[in-house]
Structures are given as structure tokens and as C-alpha cells.
Amino acid sequence: MKKNLTTIRSWEESQRPREKFLLRGAQALSTEELIAIIIGSGTKEKNAIELAREILAAASNDLGTLARFSDEDFKKFDGVGNCKAVSLMAVFEISRRCQMQQAPPMPQIYSSVSAVKTIAPLLKDLTHEECWVMYLNRGNRLISRERVSSGGLSATVLDVKMILKRALAKLASSIILVHNHPSGNRKPGKDDIIQTRQLTDAAKLCDIQLMDHIIIAGTTYYSFADDGAL
């Protein structure tokens, strides 16, 4: 959505790239917003996002093409000098080095025990409730794990559509829902049962299996799958 005001500082704080990054995470930002964070500022005529959009357009909105830009290519844009050009090139170089490193094998999740071992350290000591999703491939190997909500002492809000959208984007075949009970009570509540049923039914429509819903309660846990409740 195009803003009427050119200066990013005049935008609502939640819409500024840096603040949005901290508030909602990197995934919530567009590519041009991420580039705007790197270059930092624009010119008197255009803000950092407009400059980032111009740079992307010159690469046909293709990051692979942009990654091959030289410092001279970047400096052709008004508002990009040596410092910004080097910053952009450094980011792409880090990306290349990440891709070159040998990725460790993804852990295989074959039971509630292995799932808990993988994710419990993130949840068992929290004083508020968080909900995470583990995304698995056809071999039940972990693709990624992500926090999808964070609530108060006793509840989180589950966005089923968002979870499945991410699962489809990751080409996940199955998912495991995990949340914690700060109270230490491992038994599922009424909302836990309802949300599990909703996610199970919605996932089936996307040909994705909800393999388990695990509740972490300190050093113990509850598994819907182990209890035959799925």
C-alpha cells in the first residue's frame, strides 16, 4: 500500500520496517522492506522503501540477479554510495556462505518423546503460554519449528489458517502442535481439545496430518496422540 507521506518517520510506528521487524518478525516484512533496513535511508525525493523498490525493479524483482550486482551497479542509484553498496553486497555474501555450509541432518520425529526432547527446552520454564508448530516432511524429519502465538498466563489464540499456510509453503506433510501450561497441569483444557479438533479437520483438507498436539508442563507433558485423542 503506497503511503501519502514520503518520510518513513511520519508513518505509524508499527508500519516502519525496523519496528515492524521487532514487533512481528522478519517473515512479516516484504523484500523491499528488508532491503530498506539494510540501506537505512533514502534521499530527499524518496524514502528508503521507495529506493529499495527501485533497486529491486532494476533486478526484475529477482534476488538471484540482485545478488550478482557489483558495487558500481548499486551506486548507479541516487542515494546509494560506497557504504550502502558494500552493506548490500555483504548481506548476499553471508547468504552464499550459509548455503555453502553443510546443513546438519534434520532430526527425525518418531514419537512424542522425540518431539518433546526437541522442543521442550524452549517451553518448559516459561511463565506465560506459547504455542509452537513443528513442520515435518514425509520422512517425519523436522523442516522447522516456529512460535505461532504467545499469550498470557493461561491462553493463546490459535490461527489455523496461518499455520496451514506456512505448512503448505514449507511443503510439510505433517505438523505437531505444541504449547505449554505454565501452571504445571499437563491435562488439556476445553479450549485445547476444541482447537485440536479444528486444526485436525482443517489440516485434512490440505492433505496435511496433525501428527500430535503436545502440552509441555514443566518436566512432564501430555500427548493427544499417545492418549488416543486425535
Image: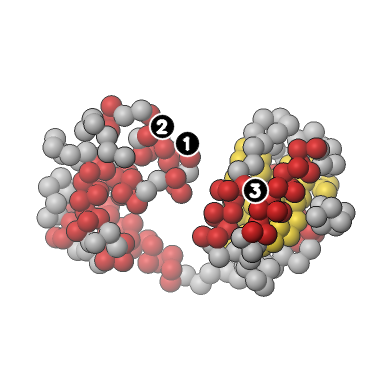
- Sooner in the amino-acid sequence: mark 1 or mark 2: 2
The answer to whether residue 120 is seen in the rendering is: no
> SS of the residue at dot 2?
helix
- Residue type for callout 3: Trp
- Mark 1–mark 2 contact, CB under 8 Å? yes
Residues at marks 3 and 2, CA–CA distance in whole angstroms = 24 Å
How far apart are the two marked residues, 3 and 1, measured between alpha carbons? 18 Å
Is residue 52 at least partly visible in the picture?
A: yes
192 shown above or below 9: below
According to the picture, the residue beneath numbered tag 2 turns out to be 14
Disc 3 to disc 2: CB gap under 8 Å: no
Circle 3: is it few (<14), some (14-19), or many (20+) Cα within 10 Å? many
Q: Where does the image place residue 6, in percent across and percent down from the top left?
A: 21, 33
**Residue 23's disc number:** 1
Helix, strand, or loop for circle 3? strand
Which residue of the protein is positioned furthest toward the front in this rendering? 205
* Residue 31: image location, x then y, percent: 34, 51
In the foreground, 166 or 26? 166
For label 1, the SS is: helix
Checking the image for residue 85, the label placed there is none
For the image shown, how many numbered marks are present on the structure? 3
Q: Residue at x 14, y 51 (%)?
A: 77
Q: Quadrant of the C terminus?
A: bottom right
Counting residues from the start of the chain, the first of labels 3 and 1 encountered is 1
Q: Amino acid at mark 2?
A: Ser
Question: Residue visible at 58% across and 48% down?
Answer: 161
Which residue is identified by label 3? 132
